[in-house]
């Protein structure tokens, strides 16, 4: 029979719940304000400054940003870069992590030293730009993927997860005549789905938020991802200009348009995250048990 908890334990739980609720509200209120502001009128937003429930609901901002295919073009670019980049990065990271997780790999410590070294030092903006230019990637969507194809931190987490798998799985597969690639794709990867899903989410969010590389490497505005378009709205505050052309001849509701573009740029990540959330904490924690 469970004993009744002490008063001190109940107070402790109540305090924790209260504090966590306050912190959760502080985190979610700004986003709720952005969503509400995107559905209100510019006059109300200018008057109240902070809105959670609009007095007058309006779709003017969304009608404006979808009045041409500009925002959809940028969304398709971001989705393409995110999906393609995540698959490419996971393919390279998985192969690298699996190879480095094998204790019989010749030069394993030597290779790991150089990979960890990149966490502390990197070539910098100008050398990276020159590499992109001389390899012919400039002004192509590949420039948003190839230079950042492997993240050393993500690869190390994946490597640690592979090392935690029971050695007996690989030994049994070898006895059955399975090759190294067969062991990886038939045994290791299916057993590592929490880590795979977690690292995939890390890569996907990185590619979706691509901004600086697009500014540096892309001069063709038709290839801009949605984050660069968002920058055009928020920073320039001149309506949604795309290649010097206005969306419509009607003056845009600037404040609400900014909020609407932020919502549109955030929705895809919010839509994907719930399907990977159950793997997220488990994969990150299991992958960090051993070095």
Image (cartoon, rainbow, N blue to C red):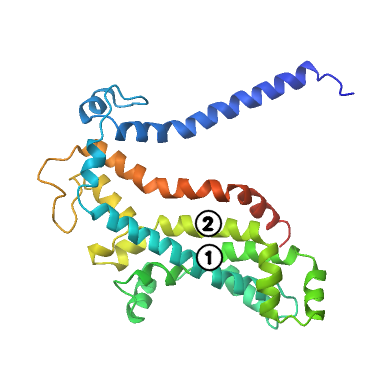
- Image quarter (top left, top right, bottom left or bottom right) of the C terminus: bottom right
Q: CA distance from mark 1 to mark 2?
A: 10 Å
Residue 105, x across and y down, in percent: 71, 80
Give the quarter of the image for residue 95: bottom right
Q: Nearer the viewer, residue 88 or 137?
A: 88
Q: Residue at x 14, y 50 (%)?
A: 246
Q: Is residue 7 left or right of residue 227?
A: right
Residue 278, x across and y down, in percent: 62, 47
Mark 1–mark 2 CB contact (< 8 Å):
yes
SS of the residue under disc 1? loop
| Number of numbered labels in the structure image | 2
Residue farthest to the front, as pictured: 176
Q: Residue at x 29, y 54 (%)?
A: 72
In this orientation, does residue 150 appear? Answer: no
Residue farthest to the left, as pictured: 249
For residue 57, above or below residue 69: above
Residue denoted by label 2? 202
Q: Nearer the viewer, residue 153 or 86?
A: 86
Residue 165, x across and y down, in percent: 75, 64
Q: Nearer the viewer, residue 184 or 125?
A: 184
In this orientation, does residue 223 appear? Answer: yes
Report the disc number at residue 151.
1
Q: Is residue 217 left or right of residue 67?
A: right
- Image quarter (top left, top right, bottom left or bottom right) of the N terminus: top right
Q: Residue at x 73, y 56 (%)?
A: 289
For residue 72, above or below residue 83: above
Q: Kindly report which numbered mark, 1 or 2, lies closer to the viewer in this rendering.
A: 2
SS of the residue under disc 2? helix
For residue 62, above or below residue 33: below
Give the mark, 1 or 2, whose residue is nearer the N terminus. Answer: 1
Residue 145, x across and y down, in percent: 42, 68
Q: Residue at x 60, y 70 (%)?
A: 94
């Amino acid at each position: 029979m469970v004993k009744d908890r002490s008063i001190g334990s109940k107070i402790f739980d109540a305090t924790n719940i209260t504090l966590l609720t306050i912190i959760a509200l502080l985190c979610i209120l700004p986003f709720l304000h952005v969503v509400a502001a995107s559905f209100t009128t510019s006059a109300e937003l200018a008057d109240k400054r902070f809105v959670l429930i609009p007095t007058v609901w309006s779709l003017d901002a969304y009608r404006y940003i979808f009045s041409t295919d500009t925002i959809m073009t940028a969304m398709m670019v971001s989705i393409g870069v995110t999906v393609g980049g995540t698959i490419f990065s996971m393919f390279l990271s998985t192969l690298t992590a699996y190879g480095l997780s094998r204790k019989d790999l010749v030069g394993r410590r030597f290779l790991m030293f150089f990979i960890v070294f990149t966490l502390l030092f990197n070539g910098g903006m100008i050398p990276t730009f020159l590499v992109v230019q001389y390899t012919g990637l400039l002004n192509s969507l590949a420039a948003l993927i190839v230079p950042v194809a492997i993240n050393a931190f993500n690869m190390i987490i994946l490597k640690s997860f592979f090392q935690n798998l029971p050695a007996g799985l690989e030994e049994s597969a070898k006895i059955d005549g399975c090759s190294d690639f067969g062991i990886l794709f038939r045994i290791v990867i299916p057993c590592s789905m929490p880590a795979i899903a977690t690292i995939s989410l890390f890569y996907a969010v990185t590619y979706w938020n691509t901004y600086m590389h697009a500014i540096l490497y892309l001069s063709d505005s038709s290839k801009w991802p949605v984050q660069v378009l968002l920058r055009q709205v928020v920073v320039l505050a001149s309506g949604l200009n795309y290649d010097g052309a206005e969306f419509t001849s009607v003056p845009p509701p600037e404040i609400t348009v900014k909020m609407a573009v932020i919502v549109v740029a955030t929705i895809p990540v919010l839509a994907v995250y719930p399907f990977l959330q159950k793997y997220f904490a488990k994969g990150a924690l299991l992958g960090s048990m051993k070095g």
